[in-house]
Image (spheres, rainbow, N blue to C red):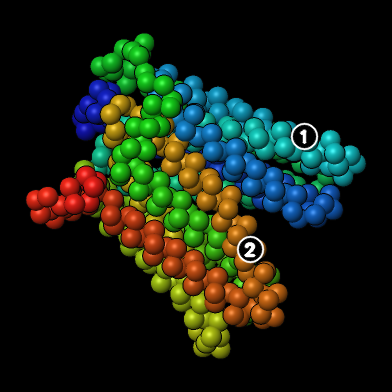
Amino acid sequence: MNPSAAKASSYGAPHLSWAGVVRLGLVQLAIGAVAALTTSTLNRVMVVEAGMPAMLPAALVAWHYIVQLSRPHWGHGSDRGHRRTPYIVGGMCVLALGAMVATDAVAMVHGNPFIGICLGLLGYSMIGGGMGAAGTSLLALLATRVAPERRPAAASITWIMMIFGIVASAGTLSALLNPFSAQRLAMVASGVAGVSVLLTFVAVWKIEAEADQGETEPATAARPPFAEVLRDIWSDPTARKFTLFVFFSMLAYSAQELILEPFAGLVFGMAPHQSAALSGLQHGGVLLGMILVGVFGARFGKAKGAWMREWTLFGCLGSAVALMGLGAATLFRPVWPLPPTVFVLGFANGVFAVSAIGSMMALAGGGKSPSAGARMGVWGAAQAAAFALGGFVGAAASDALRSLMHQAVSAFLIVFTVEALIFVGAAALAASIGAAPRKPAPRPPGLGAELGGVS
């Protein structure tokens, strides 16, 4: 371990080296690989090959987000256990097994819909629970074991690796599922699940060993109960504001994802391959934004959270401006530069996403007790609730407005404007986090008595 990595963290354990950060990024890569299988490939197979209504996979994906509302419990459990790797490994094993169960459900849903749907609910429950346990504990481990000045770069590295896992898994599935059969899908899904679990074991192997030697608090020390920890978190104004920020910003972020390609097709008349290329351009912008925050964070990172707050504000307001640009595109279709606008939206989304995760890491150590896992769980639950609601609300709102107005242009203009306003509201919340509280104005003597003693 290099000298900078040997410095003690606030919890008495040495900081992770860059190699340790990259190793933990393998867990995010594994989570991304399984996510690509369960939320994309199985979605398409249920609708196209199994001939089921599109609402079925949409409901199952929403359900796995609802299950992730259990993230605070998983985070609190890893806080109490004093070691997080068992929760990461256990969560990943449950996630992988859930992916295999969900794959079997897809194979059965055509022949026996009732059993297939019940099996699908079980599988997606395991996916949500495993993702919550592994993901929350991983972020808590990074928050407590990464040096403050490295957190922006660590957030960037781990999220880029998750995107790489999604892309690699999608490419592998595309190659191995041709020609398609239920048996081939089951074999490929088992392979993805097995490799993901293996990567997780490699990632966390002995990574907490040195940290355990440096702990200043015994593992058997009494820990406050879950309800008390939640009260501590919610009584913290910063944590409370940040929870609201995560919910609203992720609501706006997820609401625009599912309607971009329909917007390109309905308003600009793009063919499927053209709208797919537009979506790829957006993801390229996301990747560039993530890399930029990581590079600047590693080079100019500060221990204080204000620097990350500035990046978060830039990402939220940039996303709002880009969404307003998409709204303007509906009014100036022949001349509006749509691809650059979409790229800017992706870039701002990437900056916002990574800086928000970096801010999570910086804020996770606050409160009256070491509750990084529970805090990460609360914010992860807010994100899961936003994703469960955002995709459905964005798509449903555009459908409803198109039916009422009988034209796509006005419907998308309203939806993009509302999403931009939500991002502006999220930016206002982010700006208030960590700001010095205003001193109340002096009250004239006797005013309290005149108001009946109310203070």
Q: Residue at x 30, y 44 (%)?
A: 238
Query: Which quadrant of the rendered structure holds the N terminus?
Result: top left
Front in this rendered view, residue 32 or 371? 371
Front in this rendered view, residue 375 or 173? 375
Identify residue type, mark 1.
Answer: Leu
- Asked if residue 272 can be seen in this view, the reply is yes
- Residue 423 appears in which quarter of the rendering? bottom left
Q: Which residue is mark 2?
A: 395
The residue carrying pointer 1 sits among few (fewer than 14), some (14 to 19) or many (20 or more) residues within 10 Å by Cα, namely: many
Q: Residue at x 39, y 65 (%)?
A: 424
Q: Position of residue 378 (x, y in %)?
A: 44, 38
Q: Nearer the viewer, mark 1 or mark 2?
A: 2
Front in this rendered view, residue 289 or 429? 429
Q: Residue at x 58, y 68 (%)?
A: 260
200 lies left or right of 269: left
Q: Position of residue 226 (x, y in %)?
A: 43, 25
* Residue 319 vertical position relative to residue 149 in the rendered view, above or below: below
Q: Earlier in the sequence, mark 1 or mark 2?
A: 1
- Residue 123 appears in which quarter of the rendering? top right
Disc sitting over residue 9 in the figure: none
Q: Which residue is mark 1?
A: 119
- SS at circle 2: helix
Q: Position of residue 132 (x, y in %)?
A: 53, 35
